Amino acid sequence: MSGSSQNDVREFYRRQGLAGRVGFGAAPAVLVVDYYLGSTDPQSPLACNLDQPVAETVRILKAARAAQVPVIFTTVEYGADLKEAGHFLAKVPSLKILVAGSRWVELDPRLGRRPEEPILKKHFASAFFGTDLASRLRVLAVDTLIVAGYSTSGCVRATVVDALQNGFRAIIPAEAVADRAEPPHAASLFDMDAKYGDVVPVAAVLDYFAKLPQREPTEIRSGAPGTR
């Protein structure tokens, strides 16, 4: 879709009463979706070149940590028999590499994860499905979820939809999410911005963090299943 035609569609959506704004709330958290080595290492069959979006995510993480904003990561991980993958494995056979204990399920080290930052292990697209993410966010009184990660049309989009459905403002920093190809990436950004959350530049997220009131550090570790 060209820039002019996309603008025409956006204006049509607005006339139809779509593409409003949820805005930033008062209590954010950052969720980094599936920037594990199976997605970012060029030797993985699931991977593509994610260097730039990972670098943009690192910028967000540095600002979040400086502002004492909670950070949570996700990976996809299965047992050796892959039964937890269900029909997802039939659709995406490359998921078979994401077995517990393999290097492919480890976070990309460029993210610089800190010990107090939890990793939620999931089996399907949404970071909310089958995890305690919603409970964690509510315990922290979070109202705004900044969602970075991979892929825009898959796990990011599913997570953003569920964030809205669980009562959170979803913010998607455009340069910090990525997909295997531009058409699904662009279409998903457009669709999320029209219906489920606000797609904004990374710079807007950094500015938001810089203006947050200073608060005490918050640990969000838990012994709940699906974490480590």
Image (cartoon, grey):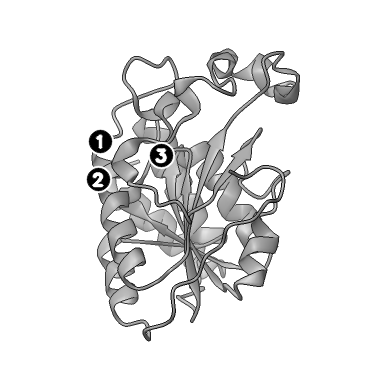
| Position of residue 169 in the picture relative to residue 1 (left or right) | right
Residues under labels 2 and 3: Cα distance?
18 Å
Q: Earlier in the sequence, mark 2 or mark 3?
A: 2
Pointer 3: residues within 10 angstroms few (<14), some, or many (20+)? Answer: many
Type of amino acid under label 3: His
Name the one closer to the observer, 56 or 213: 213
Type of amino acid under label 2: Ala
Type of amino acid under label 1: Asp
Which disc, if any, is residue 185?
Answer: 3
Residues under labels 2 and 1: Cα distance?
6 Å
Residue 86 position within the rendered picture, expressed as x and y whole percent measured from the top left? 75, 22
Callouts 2 and 1 close, C-beta under 8 Å: yes
The answer to whether residue 134 is above or below residue 167 is above
Which disc, if any, is residue 55?
Answer: 2
- Quarter location, residue 155: top right
| Position of residue 205 in the picture relative to residue 107 (left or right) | left
Residue 139 position within the rendered picture, expressed as x and y whole percent measured from the top left? 66, 71
Q: Earlier in the sequence, mark 1 or mark 3?
A: 1
Which disc, if any, is residue 51?
Answer: 1
- SS at circle 3: helix
Q: Quadrant of the C terminus?
A: top right
